[in-house]
Each structure stands twice: as C-alpha cells, then as structure tokens.
Amino acid sequence: MGWDTSRVDMNIYSQGKIDRLVYSTCNICSNGCGCFIAVKNDKIVGIMGNEEYPINRGRLGPKGENQWWANNSVDRLSAPLIRHNGKLLTSTWEDAYSLLVEKTKEVLKRKGPGGLAFYHTGQAYLEEYYTISKITRAGLRMHHVDANTRLCTATAEWSLIESFGADGPPACQEDIDIADVVVFIGRNSNETNTVFWERVLEARRKSGSKIIEIDTRNDLSDKMADLALQPRSGTNVAVLNGIIHLLIKNNWINREYIQKHTIGFTELEKTVSRYNPELVEQITNIPQSKLLQCAEWIGTSNKTVTILLQGVYQSMDATAAATLVNSMHLIMGKIGKPGSGPFQHAGQPSAMSNRETGGAGFYPGYRNNSNPKHIQEIAKLWNVDPENLPVGPQTFINNIVQLMEQGEIELFWVMFTNPAVSLPNRNKMVDIMKKVFMVVQDPFLSETADLADLVLPTALWGEKEGTMTNLERRVNVLRKAVNPPYNLPSDFEILLEFSKRMDFRDREGNPLIKYSTPEEAFNEWRRVSKGRPCDMSGMTYDKMEKLGGIQWPCNEHYPNGKERLYTDGKFYTFAHEAESYGRDLLTGRARTEEEFKALNANGKAIIYAFDWAPPLEAPSEEFPYELNTGRIVYQWHTRTKTGRAPLLHLASPEGYVEINPQNAIELEIEMGDMVRVTTKRGSIMVPARITDAVRPGAIFIPFHYGTLTENQAANVLTLETWDLVSKQPHFKNGACRIEKIMVSEGQ
Ligand SMILES: Nc1nc2c(c(=O)[nH]1)N[C@H]1C(S)=C(S)[C@@H](COP(=O)(O)OP(=O)(O)OC[C@H]3O[C@@H](n4cnc5c(=O)[nH]c(N)nc54)[C@H](O)[C@@H]3O)O[C@H]1N2
Ligand SMILES: Nc1nc2c(c(=O)[nH]1)N[C@H]1C(S)=C(S)[C@@H](COP(=O)(O)OP(=O)(O)OC[C@H]3O[C@@H](n4cnc5c(=O)[nH]c(N)nc54)[C@H](O)[C@@H]3O)O[C@H]1N2
Ligand code: SF4
Ligand SMILES: [Mo]
C-alpha cells in the first residue's frame, strides 16, 4: 500500500555542480512534503523532492519549490532593531537581549505575569514550541500565551477533544488511496495542498473513487469533483445535519458500533430528524437531489474519508460543525479503519507540533490544564513546584488584544507570525499593538515588525535543525543545510538565551532549561510525551530520517509508528486521561470535572447534537453580499516568503475580488475595474475578477495582500467574532457592499 508512483520535482539554480543535498521537509504547508535542500558555497541554491518520502514521492508544489528564495533575499534583517524616538535603529545583540530582559523584569515587577503576552505560530519547529511552553509556564508562569494556530486549526483541536477526548486526526494519507469516497468540506485542496490533491486525483484515476466537494465557491476543485455542493456561507451545520438525517433514515449506519463505542446518538437522531432535504435546501440552497446523492455515496460506500479545513473551522458554529463530521463517521462505524475516517487537516507546516507541545492552551503531551494530576506529572518531569504552574485555560488572542487595549498587558512578544495582516478587523488591531511594548521575532521587517519596539531577526528554515509534525501525525527531522547569514540566531537559540539571562531555575536551583541543542530538547520531549496519545518516545532524529518520518504514537508497542488512531474503538474520554473536560458547544462554557464525569463516556466517543442558527452577520439591504476570504495557489499567507520568490510574485502580484458575472452586469463592473468593498469594519479597493467561481450574491477576496500602505487587506473587512468553543475567528463570514470606483475618484 501507499503512494507508489514517484516524480522528482526540483528547482535548482546553480552554475556548476552543487556541493550537497540536505535532508529536510517543506516548511510551507501541513502536507509536509519530504525534500532535499541543494547547497553550494554554504548558500541554498534550490530544492529537490524526496522520491522515497511517502507523503509526496518526490513531488513539490509551486510554493514548496520556491520557498528558498526568501533565504537569499537581500532585504533580510542582519541585526536587531530598537525603536528610538519613533524610529527603528540597528542595535547590537547584547543591547537587544538586555532590553528584552530588562523590560520583561520591569513589567513582571509591576504587574506580575499578567502584564506579559506571548503570541507565536504554527510554523516553527517542535523543539521551539516545547521550549516556549517550558519558559512561559515554568519560567514566567504566565497565562497569556497563544499562537496563530488559534486562527488556523484551533477548531480541529477542539472538535477532536470534544468528540474523542484528545487531539489528533484519526485518519491518514494512505486512506486516500483506498477510500471509495473522499469528501472535502471547506478545503480547497487544489490551491492549498497541491501535492495532496494530486494524490487524490491519482487515486480516483486508479480506483474509480468519488470526490465530493462541499464549498461555498465553485472553483476548480469543485468543477473537477464528481459531485459539488455549494451551500450558502455559514450553513455547514444544516448541511451536515441533512446528510446525517439521510444516513439514519436509510439505515446507512452501524448500530452495533454506535452502541459499543459512542454516547449521545439518541439526541443527534432527534435533532436531525427535522433536517429533511426540503428544509436543508431552504437554509443552504443545495438542491435536494444533490444532498440525496451525497448522502447515498457516503452511506453506501465501504470506505469514506472526510477532509475539512477553513471553510468549516473559520465559518459559523465551527466546532459544532466539525464534531458533526466526527459523529457522521462514528455512526457509520467508519473510523479507525483502512480507507475510512474523519481527517481534520492542519494548515501550517507544524501546527500539529504546536498543539502536541501545548503551544496554545494545553500542557505538553495533550495534558489537561484543569487536571491537577496532569500538572503534577509535568511539574515532576520539569522538576518544578506544581503550585508554580498556571492552571486553567490560557488566554486566547482576542482576549490578549482586549487586555492590551485596556492597558493590562504591556509587553507583547510576537514570534513567527504577522498579526498586523492576519488578525481580523486589522485596523483596530494595529492601533492596539501600537499601545504596548512589542517585541517581534522575524527574519524580515514584516508589517508587524515595522510597528515593534524591538525586532529580533532570526535564522530561517534550512538554517537550523528541528522536527515538525504534518497533518497525518508524521514527524520528520529537518537538517540544517547552511549557516544563517550574519550569524543570526535561530528562534530556539533566542529562547535559550532569554531563559539563561532571566535565570529560570528548577526546584533544585539548576537551570530550568538543561538542553542546548534541538536534538537534546527533542530527547527531553520524548520523555514528556511518553504514555500520552502523541507518544514520540520511540522516535529519534536518525530513525525519522531512515524511515521517512514516523507517525505518532511511536513507542514500544508501535516502534515504527501507527497509521491511524482509534482502531480498537477506544477513545480518551476517561476523566483521568482526557485532554480537557470540554466546553459546552452552545455557550462555550468550560465543563467541570464533575460535569464531564457525569457524561459517563468512559472510553466511548461523544456524539453531539446541534441546531443550525443563522450567521451572525447575514447579507442585508445595506450590505447585500456574502464575504468570503481565503487563499490562492501562488501566495502564502502574508507573502513574506512567496512575495520574495520572483515567479510566485509575478504570478499573482496584487489583491483582487472575485465577483460573479451576473452581479458584475448588475453593477456595471468589467474585468479589472477598481472596486470598493465595504463592511461595517472598513473598506478596501481592489481590481475585480469576474468569474463563476463565486455564486451570485457572494464574493471572495484573497487575504494575502495586507500591506499597511496599499488598501487591499481583506482583514480590514473581516468580522471580529469568534467561535465560542475554539475561539477561532469567523474569517469566512460577514456581509459587504461592492461599488465600482469611477476613474476620477481613484486618482
Ligand atoms: N496556496 C496556499 N496554500 C496554503 C496556505 C496559503 O496561504 N496559500 N496556507 C496554509 C494554511 S495555514 C491553511 S490553514 C490552509 C487552508 O486551506 P483551505 O482551508 O483549503 O483554504 P481557504 O482558502 O482558507 O478556505 C477553504 C475553502 O472554504 C470555503 N468556504 C468558505 N466559507 C465556507 C462555508 O461556510 N462552508 C463551506 N463548506 N466552505 C466554505 C472557501 O470558499 C474556500 O474554498 O492552507 C494551507 N495552504
Ligand atoms: N481574512 C483571513 N485572515 C486569515 C485567514 C483567512 O483565511 N482569511 N487565515 C488565517 C490562518 S489559517 C493563518 S495560519 C494565519 C497566518 O497568518 P500569519 O501567521 O500572520 O502569516 P505568515 O505570513 O505565515 O507570518 C509568518 C511570519 O513569520 C516570519 N518567519 C518566517 N520564517 C521565520 C522563522 O524561521 N522565524 C521567525 N521568528 N519568523 C519567521 C515571516 O517573515 C512572517 O512575518 O492567517 C489567518 N488570517
Ligand atoms: S504541498 Fe505543501 S508541503 Fe508539499 S510542497 Fe506544496 S507547500 Fe510544500
Ligand atoms: Mo492556517
């Protein structure tokens, strides 16, 4: 089994022979394609796909192939910057570290740990996240720690916890090769996960599997699908209730599995009984025949995989909708079996590592921050007093921003993310960021770094060593290919230096951080992860390189890792092992231990029922269009890497808005006309692209174009509301107005 056809993609620019090829993984998306970095004269000169690597068998997508240009970019920061009289001026590393430590100590003295906030990423290495967890919890004892994974896969994490007791997607890539039906919900794979999309298409060619797309747009992947459903924005819950209704009605379910391995089915059955195809059509606009076809393919197939991402996670009732996908699989018993399972994709290359090491809310190893036993375990592993570790939930980014606005938080340390572009309602966020002392760790003068008081430039991918976990729990090592320019430290080294200068100690007075290399950090992490769902105790750097990455759990029972989870139908829902006691799906209120125990799940998966509710901001007379924001194939996020790759930049140099031809006629807009898009939050000006990829009444804007000088940032427009459970923003919903800008007005 596995993907057996290979094709070696490469993009190497070198006159004469290269010096070496260094083992690595692509640092762009969560697919985690295996690659080699081509080096000549201690410089990265290209990249080549790793033919042996099971995830991509040598293939690379456009962003993967071009990511290394950023390493050689002439505008990389060479030294720290400190703001003096409003201007960022170059400083020495000594001055920069001294300022960082002095400022941290000063805020700590006046305000305690509550005066500090740390906001990081889903793109760093596991060893960096683990160190962040250790420093922020055991060193600084702070609560205000979050990451951009909140904007990205917090809903995946929470839906998995709610349904199964712990994070970790049950399915794997290999399931695609053997599934009969592959369902994509709000996942535009052909643009955002290109190598995976090739695998899906190849599987269809070989085995005749069917592809179903459920996406508000009708773009290329929908057109290539065997069946495409275009629901209205924010109606995922109604679509899923409708599918589940039909599965139950036609008895395409597995009652034995339900009875043995789940709780909560009766409530679900009751709720979905209302969601007949007529009602679902009224709510979602999906023709009844299409819904029937979709349910029939899913229900009558032997093997189904369902893939979901931002069209669910960043849309209304995100966690509830994602748990419905889990429930859909549970009631069919299609989970933990070859070719079947819910496959909650991650987006960023190491969002999974962040989640495993407790980067944004939990304790390392999927430990429950409200379970004193879990805190004690960590305290013992770290040799610190459990009383000194903060308990309860960490503050999520929206609250962090509020506390900054209120003057509670005074120091905001940003690492490996560009919130001035990526947070919702960004103009407001930018004003708030200007109020605090902001430290930004970034190789470039990003929009956020430009607002900072202290900028710490870092080494990039290829210039440091570490590991990353991809979307199917596969952990791989990325070897260091070259030395960083200007002797820049890695994020890992900056964190270690900070810890040393802050003099963080364990309970015996020894340094809190005892490791000095990423590999030593990983070896400590192996002990911390042991016995937990994301057990990596059986992994080593060399073994990962030898085997081509290893899927966790990897321990004495599974020395080479395990493809899929829950093969035995046992879930992490005993109170003593669960990652969280969960939250109420309707209100977001945290459940107490007693409430969780009262569910009596005890090893069974939990099925939830949830009713559809209209989006928070539906189209109105003043704002008649549905706003949708997302990605395009050539650009990565805020373009700090892809914008520096000549071919990618040329392929898509500026922002735009997609408008349906029917609306374009009504508004007398032609291709390329400048258009003003306005929401209650603000307005932007972008050229129009007229395309049937969007439905009449809906528009789409890529969120990559967010400079503070050009007025093209999608996040000027976006809603500042969040899913109540996962706290992920509603980037995919909102209502807007569009107007053609007259030439005289634009001048
Ligand atoms: N080219 C490229 N690839 C990337 C990235 C990138 O920046 N550029 N980023 C990476 C990261 S971090 C992430 S998180 C992933 C994201 O990957 P995706 O989730 O695939 O990307 P998006 O474009 O954000 O949104 C996916 C789809 O959701 C649909 N959608 C919007 N609202 C709804 C709704 O209410 N219901 C349904 N069913 N669908 C809806 C949109 O039309 C869109 O096609 O991509 C990763 N890959
Ligand atoms: N409207 C709208 N907004 C969205 C989304 C959407 O779909 N619509 N999607 C959301 C999602 S899913 C995501 S993941 C976020 C992404 O949003 P961000 O995380 O803000 O975007 P990036 O451009 O990836 O930012 C990464 C930063 O890290 C820097 N960097 C690169 N390598 C290194 C390194 O080795 N070390 C350090 N310290 N820094 C480095 C880069 O220069 C860049 O400034 O955006 C979110 N925002
Ligand atoms: S699919 Fe993702 S991991 Fe693979 S080459 Fe493209 S960006 Fe990199
Ligand atoms: Mo993301």
Image: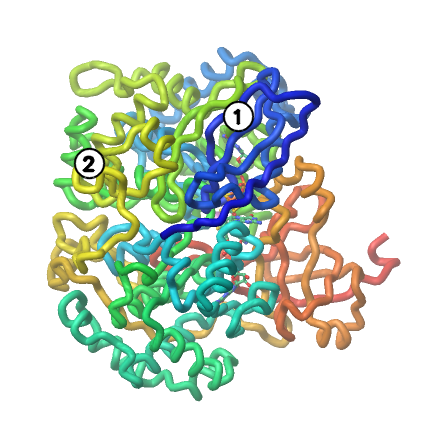
Q: Residue at x 52, y 72 (%)?
A: 226
Number of marks in the image? 2
Amino acid of disc 1: Leu
Query: Badge 2, how many Cα within 10 Å: few under 14, some, many 20+?
Result: some
Q: Which mark is residue 168?
A: none
Is residue 628 visible in the rendered image? The answer is yes
Along the line of sight, which residue is nearer the eye, 509 or 539?
539
Q: Residue at x 61, y 53 (%)?
A: 632
Q: Is residue 188 above or below residue 546?
A: below
Q: Is the residue at mark 2 in contact range of ligand 2, meaning its CB lies under 8 Å from it?
A: no
Residue 727 place in picture, x, y as percent: 39, 54
Q: Quadrant of residue 327?
A: bottom left
Query: Badge 1, how many Cα within 10 Å: few under 14, some, many 20+?
Result: some
The kind of secondary structure element at disc 2 is loop
Instruction: Tell which tag, 1 or 2, sits nearer the viewer.
Output: 1
Residue 488 place in picture, x, y as percent: 53, 18
Amino acid of disc 2: Lys
Residue 503 place in picture, x, y as percent: 31, 15
Is residue 458 visible in the rendered image? The answer is no
Q: Is residue 286 above or below residue 331?
A: below
Along the line of sight, which residue is nearer the eye, 145 or 518?
518
Q: Give the side of residue 19 with respect to residue 728, left or right.
A: right
For label 1, the residue is 21
Q: Give the side of residue 261 with respect to residue 458, left or right.
A: left
The alpha-carbon separation of the residues under discs 1 and 2 comes to 33 Å
Q: Quadrant of residue 679?
A: bottom right
Q: Which circle's residue, 1 or 2, is located before the other in the chain?
A: 1
Q: Residue at x 63, y 48 (%)?
A: 634
For label 2, the residue is 530
